[in-house]
Image: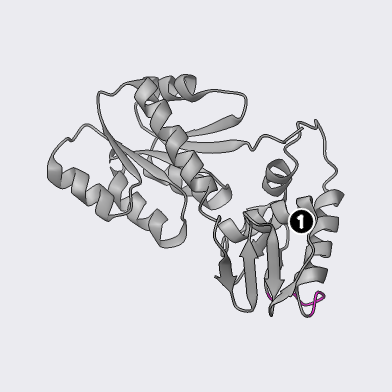
Amino acid sequence: MINQVMNRILIVEDDTALSNGIVLALKDDHSTFVQAYDIAAAKQQLRDNVFDLVILDVNLPDGNGLDLLAEVRRTLALPVIVLTANDLETDIVTGFELGADDYITKPFSLMVLRARVGVQLRKGRQQLSDSVQIDAFSFSFEKMEFLRDGKLIELSKTEQKLLRVLIENRGKIISRSDLVDRIWTDGAAYVDENALSVTIKRLRDKLEKLPSAPHYIKTVYGIGYTWAVK
């Protein structure tokens, strides 16, 4: 049976009723949601967790959502759908220029939002279809072909999942619990975190020239791991 990828969606909307309505409209067996009601809470969530998509309101109590969008775009490549009561052409253009993937004006149909979220999640999963080049590495997740200095590296399916999460979030610290949740998606109620340590070690042994002093897959003690080279 093919494992279903769990989508993690951050909703940044200060209208509690609308935020809850979005969760209800998008809820399914393979999506989880985090709700933030201002920019400060959203920033904290983006620092601490990994998301597949952000739904971002423009008018927030502590600032403009477009400023947060600009900040997100400097470090992350995840899809962002902007929500706003402003339908002025200049606002829409500004949103797209700052890197919005889609733009929906209020009021809107939750069914339409659901359809657009589906489109962006599919696009997000396709972002690494082509080869990713980092130093001497060439990674093609679509072809499941992984090279270093032109030589093939054999990776297990679990190692491929781990590598993909690290590469998609390179430069960002990912907690151990977050990695466990994203890699072991077969519905198991409990996964021993030692399994993650073993997978990290095996991946380092295959990718790092000096696994005992890794250059790429670094441990952030007490927190988790990061792919340190962008």
The colour scheme used to paint the residues is one colour
Q: Which residue is under mark 1? A: 159
Helix, strand or loop at label 1? It is helix
In the image: residue 52, left or right of residue 201: left
Q: Nearer the viewer, residue 224 or 89?
A: 89
In the image: residue 12, left or right of residue 173: left
Across and down, in percent, residue 222 comes to: 73, 57
Residue extending farthest to the front is 143
| Residue 61 visible in the snapshot | no
Residue 212: in magenta span: yes
Residue 213: in magenta span: yes
Image position of 190 with respect to 48: above or below: above
SS assignment for the magenta stretch, majority: loop
Across and down, in percent, residue 35 comes to: 47, 32
**Considering the image in quadrants, where does the N terminus appear?**
top right
Q: Nearer the viewer, residue 31 or 41?
A: 31
Residue type indicated by callout 1? Glu
Which residue appears at 61% of the width and 58% of the height?
173
Image position of 215 with respect to 192: above or below: below
Q: Quadrant of residue 154?
A: bottom right
Across and down, in percent, residue 170 comes to: 57, 63
Q: Quadrant of residue 61?
A: top left
Image position of 222 with respect to 12: above or below: below
| Residue 49 visible in the snapshot | yes
In the image: residue 163, left or right of residue 89: right
Q: Quadrant of residue 159?
A: bottom right
Which residue appears at 43% of the width and 46% of the height?
79
Which residue appears at 83% of the width and 63% of the height?
202
Across and down, in percent, residue 70 comes to: 33, 56
Q: Which residues are magenta?
A: 210-215
